[in-house]
Image (cartoon, rainbow, N blue to C red):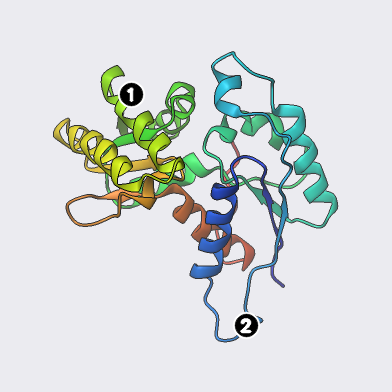
Amino acid sequence: MQKVVGIIGGMGPLATVDLMSKIIFYTPAKKDQDHIHIIVDNYSQIPDRTTAILGKGTDPTPFMIQSARLLENAGADFLVMACNTAHFYFNAVSNSVSIPILNMPLETARFLHGNKLRRAGLLATDGTINTKLYQHSCETYDIHVIEPDLQMQKEVMEGIYAIKAGNLDEGFLHLSEAADKLRESGAEAIIAGCTEIPLVLKSSEQMNIIDPTEILAKRVIETATETAKELVEV
């Protein structure tokens, strides 16, 4: 029997839709009925994580816990969060429910380790960079993460904001320049730690872009179809 996945939404509609579409796309299916059972609580009142992390906004933890409990009560067997910075609150939310939550930064680090990648560049928002989510997860597997310097991070944020505004060409220029600098610094792959980044930076032999949402979607399928190894406790 398939397990039910609950998505804690309300933290960027694009991220939630992107995760759902990838779960559907990667699910092996021979007919319409072969799909993963997904339930979403897209609670729009969850405060912005980046501003909270930077000490300028409301703590989102109670709102995220409320969503997690609603999904558990609705029948979810395990939970996921499409938002990168949401994982800063992972332990608090995980300790408030009795079902497991997949950890996207840790799953990404596991993927890098499995592909024998030892140095990864990180493109992400200020919130994700400052929380060290991917850095700490990669340390678990002895993977070094190369962060943008302050000037480069400004380029990254300008690129992300440009994409949010619908200016994909401008976003590409900012982000591709930052990605090139990270590779010049020794990065073997680039972690796209923001949902918007893969919209303009596509993975190729030259530009090895690692999409955490894609990795999470595939892990969801494994877990939901009971073919995965036991969930990692964090």
Task: Name the residue nearer the viewer: 210 or 202.
Answer: 202
How far, Cα to Cα, is label 2 from label 1? 44 Å
The mark closer to the camera, 2 or 1, is: 1
Query: Which residue sits at x=45%, y=21%?
Result: 130
Which residue is farthest left? Answer: 184
Amino acid residing under circle 1: Lys
Graded by Cα atoms within 10 Å as few (under 14), some (14 to 19) or many (20 or more), the crowding at tag 1 reads: some
Query: Which residue sits at x=59%, y=13%?
Result: 55
Amino acid residing under circle 2: Asp
Which mark is drawn over residue 40?
none
> Is residue 95 at all visible to an observer of this figure?
no
Q: Quadrant of residue 77?
A: bottom right
Which mark is drawn over residue 154?
1
Task: Name the residue nearer the viewer: 182 or 133.
Answer: 182
- Image coords of residue 57 (percent x, y): 64, 18
Q: Secondary structure beneath disc 1?
A: helix
- Image coords of residue 104 (percent x, y): 51, 44
Graded by Cα atoms within 10 Å as few (under 14), some (14 to 19) or many (20 or more), the crowding at tag 2 reads: few
Mark earlier in primary sequence (2, 1): 2
Relative to 61, residue 106 above or below:
below
Which residue is farthest right? Answer: 73
> On the rendered structure, is 58 left or right of 117?
right
Which mark is drawn over residue 32?
2
Query: Which residue sits at x=48%, y=46%?
Result: 107
Name the quarter where the C terminus is drawn: top right
> Is residue 107 at all visible to an observer of this figure?
yes
The answer to whether the residue labelled 2 contacts the one labelled 1, judged by CB atoms less than 8 Å apart, is no
Task: Name the residue nearer the viewer: 175 or 130.
Answer: 175
Task: Name the residue nearer the viewer: 166 or 33.
Answer: 166
- Image coords of residue 43 (percent x, y): 74, 42
